Image (cartoon, coloured by chain):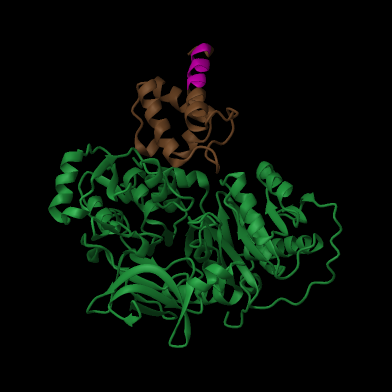
Chain colours: A brown, B green
Amino acid sequence: MSDRTTLDRKSKIREFIIQKLLNGRSVADDENLLLSGLVDSLGVFDLVAFLEKTFELTIPLDEVVLEHFSSIDTISAYVASKQAG
Amino acid sequence: MDGVQYIDEIVRVWARETPDAVAFKFAEEALTYHALDDAADRLAKMLIEGGVRPGDRVGVYVDKSLDTAIAIYGIMRTGAAYVPMDPGAPEERLVQIAAACGLKAIVSQERKAAGYRAVIAAAPDLACVLGADGAVLWATDVPQNRGAPRARRTDDPAYIVFTSGSTGTPKGITHTHETGLAYVRMSVDLYGVTQEDRLSNHSPLHFDMSTFDMFSGPYAGATTVIISEMHMKLPASLAQLIEQERLTIWYSVPHALIQLVERGAIENRDFSALRWVIFGGEPMLPDQLRAFGLHTPNARFSNSFGPAEVNQCSYKHLDLADIDGTPISIGTPCAHADLVILDGDERADEGELFVATPAMMVGYWNDPERNAQAFRVIDGRRHYLTGDLVRRDSAGELHFLGRADRQVKVRGFRVELDEIELLMSRHDDVSEAAAVVIGNPARIAAYITARPGATPDTADLRAFAAQALPPQAVPTILSILPEFKRTATGKIDRKHLAEVYDV
């Protein structure tokens, strides 16, 4: 997979999180998104729906876990692994 | 433990008895009773150097972690009261709480600097901000010549929990070492908590339910597992944690259990260690509890009832077989509680609930006006007016009917909003329901969220409501929401519903 694909994927995810879930507050790619005052539990489910639609994935409940959803970096890597699989 | 007079002494006792036993766990980190005792002493010493004295108030502004435990025990050890500050609250709210109780110091974390700096700028009494390790994050230039600390007293406030008052100014529910320990002793006894137990700490510190996890667990010498904010937002990770930590006692708001059922992927989880599943804060939906109970082979269930002002005052224990879809009662009074039902001035089997217990708050902080209205002397004893409507059945069990202020009149008829919610939540397509009154003339609006995979239809929901409710109680407005906005403590934010969807 090219770097360009990775960049595109990550920027789509970043844009959704910053615009839709954080009201424009900036956040680093490796920053924990789930600490207090950032993405709430409703936001997590919006995010899952966004990923499923944008990247044409099915995300089972048991994969909506910390390892995959704690930062923009981990979300992007998770989406990449789903697309590869 | 019978001789313990101060909540923080609990840790001192176990530090001597079982120094290497784990008092608190957070992710991969563990804090033994010995380590907690040491850390609390160190923090207390630094707070006293920073100007804190018995009777003062000290804020706890930390993300959930082992710092939470060190902060509260360290603060109490100085003779001051700890005041939880929601780590996710807007700065305005933090400033409001600091002003309402005149915070002398705050225990915080460097990453929370934006929040505590806002308080520093607005709170002239504040002397210092420390880390849980005692590190000075900020200190005032104003000399703190406060002399030697006076001796502490058991009737000094131990903690003050602020709730958002309906009129805007926060209400500070004030508990002393005496009232706190009265609750701890009752709850340890009621649930038979022992050294072998592993408790969940799901509730954030600014929610009074956390006192069971933070005090009652340590009182028994047990281990309390502090659950991160991340886990609280990811039910599948939370389910994994319950299994891996082999939790034996679970205590949370119903919402957390519902989330586990609906999104926790719990089918293949091993919850066999759980022996108590306790819930409180708002009514639990029986069908959802049953769905959870199918995965906990060794657990009993307990509905813990009581407003934060009195701590827990009644309970209903259930086995899986008892959960048959009918509403779960709030049971019978706890051993230490006197419950009185009044209809007007008369004792009755249905009416408003008044409670007296040694675990009752001493009052709202610095709020004589509210305190004058909060209590009523019945048979020579001060009772707290809960504002809850209850009914006592022929077997002596209490049933929650709703809040007195949720009993509304529509076209002259008395309507219970909570009854509407319970009915709507029993529809097969419905996950949760909330009913509010909007507009003038008053109309009933009901909002629901769908169960995963279900696609509810408003016409069908309306027909369902009309079948069971008197005409005046059938919601005029019925609307399906993707999710409910929650209060800081995880309850459905009904005030928000009434404001946002008012038409």
For the point 20% across and 47% down, the residue is: B428
Placement of B310 over or under B143, stated as above or below: below
For the point 36% across and 45% down, the residue is: B264
Placement of B348 over or under A70, stated as above or below: below
Question: Is B223 situated left or right of B408 in this image?
Answer: right
Observer-nearest of B233 and B328? B328
Quarter of the image that includes the C terminus of chain A = top left
Magenta stretch encompasses residue B35: no
Q: x%, y% of residue B13?
A: 63, 74
For the point 40% across and 76% down, the residue is: B354
Which residue is most to the bottom?
Answer: B380
Hey, which quadrant is residue B469 in on the image?
bottom left
Region rendered in magenta: A4-12
Question: Is B431 situated left or right of B335 in this image?
Answer: left
Q: x%, y% of residue A84?
A: 41, 20
Question: Is B76 situated left or right of B27 in this image?
Answer: right
For the point 23% across and 55% down, the residue is: B411
Observer-nearest of B25 and B64? B64
Observer-nearest of B351 and A58? B351
Q: x%, y% of residue B172?
A: 57, 63
- Is residue B287 in sight in this rendering? no
Predominant SS along the magenta part = helix
Hey, which quadrant is residue B330 in on the image?
bottom left
Q: x%, y% of residue B262?
A: 32, 45
Question: Is B144 situated left or right of B13 in this image?
Answer: right
Placement of B68 over or under B397, stated as above or below: above
